Image (cartoon, grey):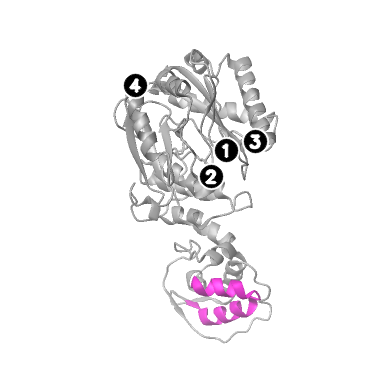
């Protein structure tokens, strides 16, 4: 194992510190499972690196020390480190690409200059994280009383810096502010990539320690508009162990193309976070790391801060309706009941109605709209019972679908039975 020992020792001992444990999170890239080891000294870190710094493992570590052998943010009383995750948006070149490395360096310099000008904050280290860079700031221990203000401050700084960033394709908006946040372990290799890049230190100035309390005490807390309230849905109870069997997670395992309009962040991750909130899922870092291992990049999985947002199965169901062709290709069936149909007393009847106007049904949403018009036109109530012409409707819908792939999707999902009562 080759590394600059003094840089390595200096970073873990004087920047991160052993107070009392540094958590190391080991991921098996083949089965996506993770486990934690805890180091109290450099010798124990050496042992971890010797055993796991090789394929199929990736080594991550908790940037804020743990007082006990814990993983959860709620059990970490102080924050002493935060950092910016600087990398290309989308497919990332390796760091041997000189133009890409220059773009990363220019962006890091931009953040350093802006934070120094605005808040007199100075970085303690810059490291190569694999195919990106992590810019570290060390602060005097910041307790839980400042947690909410810190997160608001950090997100606001990210957004403001993003407006004038020097390289449009380089991002640093990932939510890296969670106290329990893990990052690539310094002087380990990122074994996911074929070149297995070393996560090495670019510079380290161990005396650059900042005070955040005056900044947070004087900050103006932003006021956010009220978000859309999502009606609560039903589901089985998920746990830390079973959350990876939930449809909201399984859909992410399909290899969804990034930056191609599949709404990974604002729909799928949104639904997954709300599901985890509903069932008080604690292993957020593991979910985040597994998500990153799927190839999507890092995303913070911290709980939502707006209590008015609650989980609903319709978030994923509506995503499936919109992206039905992708779901058909991946054989991902509708995981939940469609929320459009109501249950009430009804019976069916045949009238052998042929609707010549039923043409050009190209999407599941077109089908739902057509069935709604059909039911409102032909259905009637007799002695308190609704009469539906379901078989007639099905025949007309199938006649109106020209795309054989959509017919296949409708059949596989038993879709017409799921939406037959929509009004």
Tag 1 secondary structure:
loop
Q: CB atoms at circles 4 and 2 under 8 Å apart? A: no
Q: Position of residue 191 (x, y in %)?
A: 48, 43
Work out whether 223 lies above or below 94: above
Mark nearer the N terminus (1 vs 2): 1
Q: Residues within 10 Å of mark 1 (few under 14, many from 20)?
A: many
Q: Which residue is mark 2?
A: 193
Neighbor class of circle 3 (other Cα within 10 Å; few <14, some 14-19, many 20+) is many
Q: Mark 3 sits on what residue?
A: 170
Disc 4 secondary structure class: loop
**Sequence-first tag of 1 and 3:** 1
Of residues 411 and 6, the one drawn nearer to the viewer in this rendering? 6
Foreground pick, 231 / 279: 279
329 over 273 or under it: above or below: below
Residue topped by disc 4:
19
Q: Which residue is mark 1?
A: 131
Residue 57 location (% of width, % of height): 42, 44
User: Where, quadrant-wise, is the C terminus in this rendering?
Assistant: bottom right
Number of callouts in the render?
A: 4
Q: In front: 301, or 67? A: 67
Tag 3, which secondary structure?
A: strand
Crowding at dot 2, Cα within 10 Å, few <14 / some 14-19 / many 20+, comes out as: few
Give the Cα separation between the discs numbered 1 and 3: 12 Å
């Amino acid at each position: 194992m080759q590394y600059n020992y003094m840089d390595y020792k200096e970073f873990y001992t004087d920047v991160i510190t052993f107070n009392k444990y540094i958590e190391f999170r080991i991921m098996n890239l083949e089965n996506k499972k993770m486990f934690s080891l805890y180091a109290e000294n450099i010798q124990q870190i050496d042992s971890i690196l010797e055993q796991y710094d090789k394929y199929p493992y990736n080594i991550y570590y908790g940037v804020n020390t743990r007082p006990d052998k814990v993983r959860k943010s709620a059990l970490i009383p102080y924050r002493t480190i935060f950092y910016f995750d600087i990398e290309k948006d989308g497919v990332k070149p390796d760091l041997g690409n000189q133009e890409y490395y220059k773009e990363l360096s220019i962006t890091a310099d931009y953040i350093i200059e802006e934070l120094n000008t605005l808040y007199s904050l100075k970085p303690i280290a810059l490291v190569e994280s694999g195919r990106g860079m992590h810019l570290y700031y060390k602060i005097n221990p910041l307790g839980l009383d400042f947690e909410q203000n810190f997160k608001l401050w950090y997100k606001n700084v990210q957004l403001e810096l993003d407006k004038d960033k020097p390289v449009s394709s380089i991002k640093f908006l990932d939510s890296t502010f969670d106290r329990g946040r893990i990052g690539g372990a310094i002087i380990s290799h990122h074994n996911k990539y074929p070149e297995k890049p070393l996560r090495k230190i670019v510079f380290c100035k161990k005396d650059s320690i900042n005070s955040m309390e005056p900044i947070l005490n004087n900050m103006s807390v932003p006021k956010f508009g009220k978000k859309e309230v999502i009606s609560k849905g039903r589901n089985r109870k998920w746990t830390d162990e079973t959350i990876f069997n939930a449809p909201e997670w399984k859909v992410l395992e399909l290899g969804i193309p990034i930056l191609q309009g599949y709404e990974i962040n604002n729909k799928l991750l949104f639904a997954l976070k709300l599901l985890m909130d509903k069932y008080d899922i604690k292993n957020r870092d593991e979910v985040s790391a597994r998500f990153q291992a799927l190839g999507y990049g890092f995303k913070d999985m911290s709980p939502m801060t707006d209590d008015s947002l609650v989980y609903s199965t319709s978030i994923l169901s509506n995503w499936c309706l919109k992206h039905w062709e992708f779901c058909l290709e991946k054989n991902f069936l509708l995981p939940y009941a469609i929320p459009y149909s109501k249950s009430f007393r009804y019976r069916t009847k045949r009238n052998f109605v042929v609707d010549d106007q039923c043409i050009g049904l190209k999407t599941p949403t077109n089908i739902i709209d057509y069935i709604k018009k059909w039911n409102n036109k032909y259905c009637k109530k007799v002695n308190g019972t609704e009469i539906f012409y379901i078989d007639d409707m099905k025949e007309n819908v199938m006649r109106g679908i020209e795309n054989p792939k959509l017919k296949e999707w409708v059949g596989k999902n038993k879709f017409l039975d799921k939406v037959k009562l929509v009004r």
